[in-house]
Amino acid sequence: MELTLQIRMNEKLFLRNPEETELGREILLHSIVLIHKTGFELFTFKKLAEKIGTTEAGIYRYFENKHRLLVYIVSWYWSWLEYKVMVHTNNIKSPEIKLKKIIQILATEVKDDVQTTHVDERLLHEIVRMEGAKAYLTRHVTEDNKQRLFKPYKDLCGTIAAIIQECNPKYKYPRSLSSTIIEMAHYQNFFMRNLPSLTDFGNIKDDGKVIGFLENLVFASLYPLKRK
């Protein structure tokens, strides 16, 4: 039996829940494909409507504007990633091994999840890596934050921060390190594949190199006295 993963989203992100209708799921699926193909700046509801054979008005019944749609799919990704982290670390007792597993998850290229037929996680991962910051780098970020639109990202950071504190309860910056791991995993992976001179990995294109770098960064911060 094929299981379908359902992620509950903040109702302030949409006008009508897109996961509850066939058209809504088509909007999510094809918006990801289109944003990945054209970039967020060139993405429009008109192009999306033409892609799925509906009207712009039909899409506006689900989302107030394209920025709200971007925040939705980015937040969906963070919730999916936290679920993935929890599943893969649930039976691990050692916090250090948990943290290494999380770094591996964050720094490894994503494959499409068969549990979600209306979302291509591989494409969404690339969108988050290249366009994700646009969800909160806006003039209305404070108001959006009050509406808890970024809670999935904060929840993921909180989950990782709790494991960091398990590793070293005296470490002063667990949340800062947590968000740094997430962002660094994305940026170093992107640089490795597109701007290799900004990394020490050249044109190797090996996720293991990024994982090794992040492990060195994280554990040198957590256990500075153990450094040789």
Image (cartoon, helix red, strand yellow):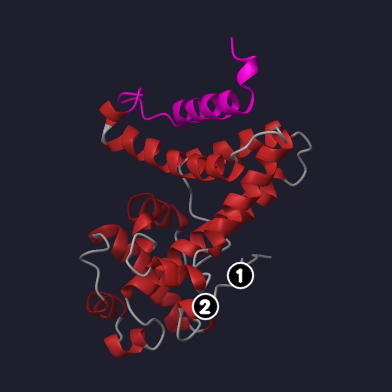
- Dot 1 alpha-carbon crowd within 10 angstroms: few under 14, some 14 to 19, many 20 or more: few
Residue topped by disc 1: 6
- Please say whether residue 4 is one of the residues in the magenta stretch: no
Query: For the point 69% across and 31% down, which residue is it?
Result: 96
Query: For the point 63% across and 45% down, which residue is it?
Result: 161
Quadrant of the frame with the N terminus? bottom right
Query: For the point 32% across and 36% down, which residue is it?
Result: 191
Secondary structure at numbered mark 1: loop
Q: Which residue lies furthest to the top in this view?
A: 228
Q: Disc 1 marks which amino acid?
A: Gln
Tell me which corner region of the image, top left, top right, bottom left or bottom right, holds residue 23: bottom left
Q: 55 left or right of 19?
A: left
User: The magenta stretch spans which residues?
Assistant: 199-228
Percent x, y for residue 190? 34, 40
Residue topped by disc 2: 19
Residue 55 can be seen in this image:
no
